[in-house]
Image (spheres, rainbow, N blue to C red):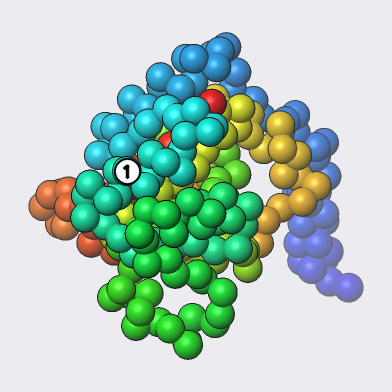
């Protein structure tokens, strides 16, 4: 082995990256109680044109029925989750033309894009600091439910409203079971052109309603 090669290898060994200890779990505690979380979530969501309503557990289906009929929206979409079953039970009485996301998208893609007025989904959590909804799309509530219809109605349990993302992933132990797909939604769809003019509803729902269930 030549001296030059030996010198190069020696320097590489000396500069080898050493194993580091596992970092401490990141946390950002804010000390917000339940009411403060709801207030901050609502403020942030409304700042980007999202609607937020606090609804009693027994009233959320009736609220959707009344409000959507008043807005002239009669074609809802639901999946196969527990939320879907609760809503479907009261949808017929309201006169909705209920659609189910229960088949491959290729079989009814045109209907999804042209015949649906709004979709109703559940949520995994909400983040108060940023006014963000967290969804884990799956076979029961596919991702397109929250991305395609003009209006997305998200059902958020008040006790699943966390201060921020750091608290959420610790409280729900994401480290032991990461989702294959997670959506973080802060308001309706929006984008900005090169002149930084903000436009809503360009690449997804024009409106987002969050019902905080208490």
Q: Which quadrant of the structure image shows residue 140?
A: bottom right
Residue for point 37% across, 31% down: 53
In front of the other: 94 or 10: 94
Q: Circle 1: is it few (<14), some (14-19), or many (20+) Cα within 10 Å?
A: few
Residue 130 seen in this snapshot: no
Label 1 residue SS = helix
**In screen coordinates, is 199 left or right of 106?**
left
Q: Is residue 107 above or below residue 85?
A: below
What percent of the width, then of the height, locates residue 137? Answer: 57, 60
Residue 58 appears anywhere in the view: yes
Which x, y percent locates residue 16? Answer: 78, 51
Q: Nearer the viewer, residue 49 or 75?
A: 75
* Residue 157, position as x, y percentages in the image: 56, 34
Q: Quadrant of the image for the N terminus? A: bottom right
Instruction: Please identify the quarter of the rendering in which residue 13 is found.
Output: bottom right
- Residue 23 position within the rendered picture, expressed as x and y whole percent measured from the top left: 75, 33
Height in image: 38 above or below 144? above
Seen in the image, is 160 located left or right of residue 144? right
Vertical arrangement, residue 116 with respect to residue 30, above or below:
below
Q: Nearer the viewer, residue 70 or 212?
A: 70
Which residue matches tag 1? 66
Which residue is at 32% across, 55% downward?
A: 151
* Residue plotted at (32% across, 43% down): 66
Residue at 47%, 14% in the rendered image: 36
Q: Seen from this angle, which residue lies furthest right?
A: 1
Of the 4 image quadrants, the one containing the C terminus is: top right
Quick one: which residue is furthest to the front in this view? 93
């Amino acid at each position: 082995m030549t001296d030059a090669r030996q010198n190069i290898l020696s320097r590489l060994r000396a500069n080898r990256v050493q194993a580091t200890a596992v970092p401490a779990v990141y946390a950002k505690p804010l000390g917000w109680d339940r009411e403060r979380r709801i207030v901050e979530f609502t403020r942030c969501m409304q700042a980007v044109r999202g609607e937020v309503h606090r609804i009693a557990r027994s009233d959320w289906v009736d609220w959707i029925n009344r409000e959507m009929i008043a807005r002239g929206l009669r074609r809802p979409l639901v999946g196969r989750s527990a939320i879907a079953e609760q809503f479907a039970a009261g949808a017929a009485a309201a006169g909705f033309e209920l659609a189910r996301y229960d088949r491959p998208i290729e079989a009814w893609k045109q209907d999804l894009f042209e015949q649906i007025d709004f979709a109703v989904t559940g949520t995994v959590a909400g983040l108060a600091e940023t006014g963000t909804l967290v969804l884990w799309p799956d076979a029961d509530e596919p991702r397109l439910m929250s991305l395609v219809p003009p209006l997305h109605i998200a059902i958020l349990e008040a006790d699943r409203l966390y201060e921020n993302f750091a608290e959420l992933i610790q409280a729900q132990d994401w480290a032991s079971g990461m989702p294959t797909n997670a959506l973080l939604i802060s308001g309706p769809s929006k984008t900005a052109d090169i002149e930084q003019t903000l436009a809503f509803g360009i690449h997804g729902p024009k409106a987002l309603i969050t019902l905080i269930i208490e």
